[in-house]
Amino acid sequence: MNTAFVQITVNGTLYQKEVEPRMTLVDFLRDELGLTGTHVGCEHGVCGACSILLNDEPIRSCCIFAVQADGMAVTTVEGLALGRGQLSKIQDAFCEKHALQCGYCTPGMLIACHDLIKHTPHPNADEVREAISGNICRCTGYQQIVDAVLYATDPNGANHE
Amino acid sequence: MKAAAFEYVRADNLEHALGILDEAGAEAKLIAGGQSLVPMMAMRFARPSLLVDINRLEELKKISQDEQTIRIGACVRQRDIEFDHSLNQTAPLLKKALSWVGHSQTRNRGTIGGSLVYADPSAELPLASLILGASMHLQSDAGGLREVEAANFFLGPMFTAVSETECLLAIDLPIWHGKRIGSAFTEVSMRKGDFAMASAACQLQINDDETLRRISFGVGGVNSVPTIFPQIAQKMIGKHLTPELAQEIALMVAKECDPGSDTHVSSRFRRSLAETLLARVMLEAVEDSMHNGVNK
């Protein structure tokens, strides 16, 4: 079996591992590092469940091999909140507005929404829908997810930071 | 849904990549953004035994422009084209096409070169490159450099003029000059970001007397390769592009197409979509030329 040595920083921690080149980044995160927050859905870039931030840009971690991410920085859903036991503003709003039922799509949705508000701090509903258009949810019908993001980012809302 | 085992080499520079391709031939495959190749490998439609990663080759990541031509490196990310202000001035059709390409997460990785070389019949960038009259720069160790016009580049579904030992280096796009240039791109798919059932795009320029000075249009997802219709376009020069003329031309184009059927779309529906979408983009391009044409 041929392997390659990789160094990948995940949520601020540097990991060094030998991996098979065919191992996708999402399998690396889940199986090698035990970070099972990132979910595996379709494994061919359609569902968005495995979305992560690679060097601060959202990508599908099933469509990149771990060996390609050598030397790069990854943020997963586990790294979105400031500390253990805490929730980010968007995560809190997802709870508040019931933006998940089974939760399978949630890590990908959160990554997509975090990237949206980084660039557009106060999005409108259309912008939220465009931002999550690459993520499939089979439970919510998407409306509660849109509601949650608008709630979290409302400049006049009680949730305003 | 896991790729078969392969060897991996990260190319240090272009010579390195071309040298490996020259030695390994059909066994090796270049990987850029991987947004088509990695899913193909996961489904084992593609089983390269050697993957040559060209993602870090800075020489393939440049965008440059002079008076006449835009040059985009093959490894420029789709997202970087989408947000390049100066490209959006000189070739706004690219951004319009890109808004239909996958999703922001895939455009962050996907490259323009990857999309062209993969050559899915319904892909947006191949159609846009045909309409804009692009030419592709290819290089191999044995054959050196060569340039292939977009019109001779797409040979069949997932099949291009690029040989097994060649690498696409860059894409040249001639800049349209003058006022009242307009463009439009549209498509229909099951879900936004999915492969198009049919797509259509148009770029045109209008004279002061409202007649057509220049027009280029085409359809994607309908034939085995994206198709433009230069002969029909030539006959439209000097005419007013009215809704009636747009309908007439769209019908003529639809009759020339040879659409296939699949589980989602019948051949008949696909032809009808091509007709409707083509008429629509022509009129949208006229509208666009009045407001925010290229190089006003």
Image: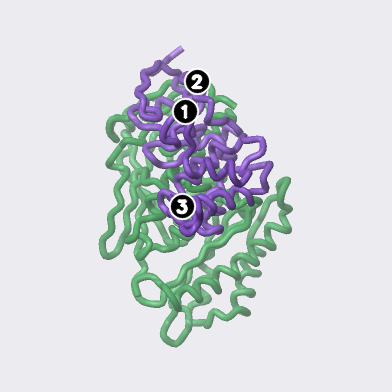
Q: Nearer the viewer, residue B251 or A108?
A: A108
Please provide percent x and percent y for residue A40.
57, 30
Q: Spot the residue most to the top.
A: A1
The reply to the same-chain question for discs 2 and 1 is yes
In the rendered image, the vertical position of residue A10 relative to residue B271, given as above or below: above
In the rendered image, the vertical position of residue A130 relative to residue B110, given as above or below: below
Q: Amino acid at mark 2?
A: Gly
| Residues at marks 2 and 1 touching, judged by CB atoms closer than 8 Å | no
Q: Is residue B160 left or right of residue A41?
A: left
- Specify few, some or many for label 1: CA neighbours under 10 Å numbering under 14, 14-19, or 20 or more: many
Please provide percent x and percent y for residue B44.
58, 28
Q: Identify the residue shown where x is 50% and y is 28%.
A: A26
Residue pointed to by mark 1: A25
Q: Spot the residue most to the left.
A: B66
Q: Earlier in the sequence, mark 2 or mark 1?
A: 1
Of badges 2 and 1, nearer the viewer stands: 2
The residues bearing labels 3 and 1 have C-alpha atoms spaced at a distance of 35 Å
Q: Which chain is green?
A: B
- Secondary element under disc 2, as helix, strand or loop, is loop
Q: Is residue B257 left or right of residue A57?
A: right
The mark found on residue A160 in the picture is 3
Q: Amino acid at mark 3?
A: His
The residues bearing labels 3 and 2 have C-alpha atoms spaced at a distance of 34 Å
Q: Amino acid at mark 1?
A: Leu
| Residues at marks 3 and 2 touching, judged by CB atoms closer than 8 Å | no
Chain A: its colour in the image is purple
The residues bearing labels 2 and 1 have C-alpha atoms spaced at a distance of 12 Å
Q: Is residue B273 left or right of residue B237?
A: right
